[in-house]
Amino acid sequence: MPATHVDLEIASQPSTWREAADLAPHAAEKLPSDGERVAVVGCGTSWFIAMAYAGRREEAGRGLTDAFAGSEFPLSRSYDRVVAISRSGTTTEIIGLLEHLTGTPTTLLTAVHDSPAEKVADQTLVLDFADEQSVVQTRFATSTLALLRASLGEDLAPVIADAEKALAVDVKKLAAVDQCAFVGRGWTVGLACEAALKTREAAQFWAESYPAMDYRHGPISIAQPGRLVWSLGPEPEGLADDVAATGAEFVRHDLDPQAGLVVAQRLAVTIAKAKGLDPDNPRSLTRSVILA
Ligand code: F1P
């Protein structure tokens, strides 16, 4: 199968992450400042990126940060700022929430100018250079995370170098399995959720995701030969051995976890193509979900 949009979008991530990191100093006023109590919201992929950023910001000691699916924001709580992530800026739950949050400063991170969500957000940051033609999100999501990590003062250069390495990892052998559980800890739980969503969306592949410490509280019963347990980030002590004892393969790449997600994106596309599916256009999915 020739290169699809998502192939090209995955391959462009080192360059869009660089552009996103360069944007950080100019975006500071619109993004959370230290100590602010922040909620980050999104749907689907955008929610999982919200989770990753929330974990990263709290781990960096920059302030309380919660993440919610757009539909599940607890309206009884008060935050100093709400950050909404939506590639399209047309997702129903995000527009509804931004409309509702009149007393709370809101910032929208999006790929598109002049969207309906922008009209109801206080501040907007447009990462138009990372927009995508594939329905399946890859580089918008990861570039948004690159911007947010850079805004926490992180140096993205080693992460970008790891993304280049991730593009060269051989995923053919991994694609021969019939199931995968992605696991992570702290901020990488969101990345594990996103890796699993990617393989489900693009390839109709059976993938699950868990906090790595929770994997042995039940999900391990699924592990057997021909299946993977894939850790985004360092795994808890003993997990690799416990997985090996089931006959499943334990996988971890020696990369920044955000670059590890790039390997999972490539796995999703590889499995989709092997099944004769179009990874740009998953069944039952559209670029954004607009509900009646
Ligand atoms: C959110 C989303 C994506 C999903 C698909 C449909 O869109 O649910 O996560 O992969 O593209 O839309 P958005 O709010 O980020 O535009």
Image (spheres, grey):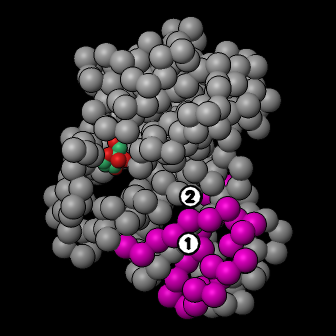
The amino acid beneath tag 1 is Ala
Q: In this view, does 234 lie above or below 112?
A: below
- Residue lying at 66% horizontally and 46% vertically, measured from the top left: 187
Q: Can residue 129 be seen in this view?
A: no
Along the line of sight, which residue is nearer the eye, 36 or 56?
36
Of callouts 1 and 2, which one flags the residue occurring earlier in the amino acid sequence? 1
User: Disc 2 designates what residue?
Assistant: 192
In the image, ligand 1 is in what quadrant? top left
Along the line of sight, which residue is nearer the eye, 176 or 82?
82
Q: Where does the magenta region start and end?
A: 205-233
Along the line of sight, which residue is nearer the eye, 166 or 87?
87
Neighbourhood count class around disc 1 (C-alpha, 10 Å): few under 14, some 14–19, many 20 upward: many
Locate residue 152, reporting x and y percent.
67, 24
Quadrant hosting residue 250: bottom right
Quadrant hosting residue 209: bottom right
Disc 1 C-beta below 8 A from ligand 1: no
Q: What element carries label 1?
A: strand
Work out which residue is located at the far front of the displayed protein and give it: 76
- Image quarter where the C terminus lies is top left
Q: Answer whether residue 184 is magenta in the image.
A: no
User: Disc 1 designates what residue?
Assistant: 181
Q: What element carries label 2?
A: helix
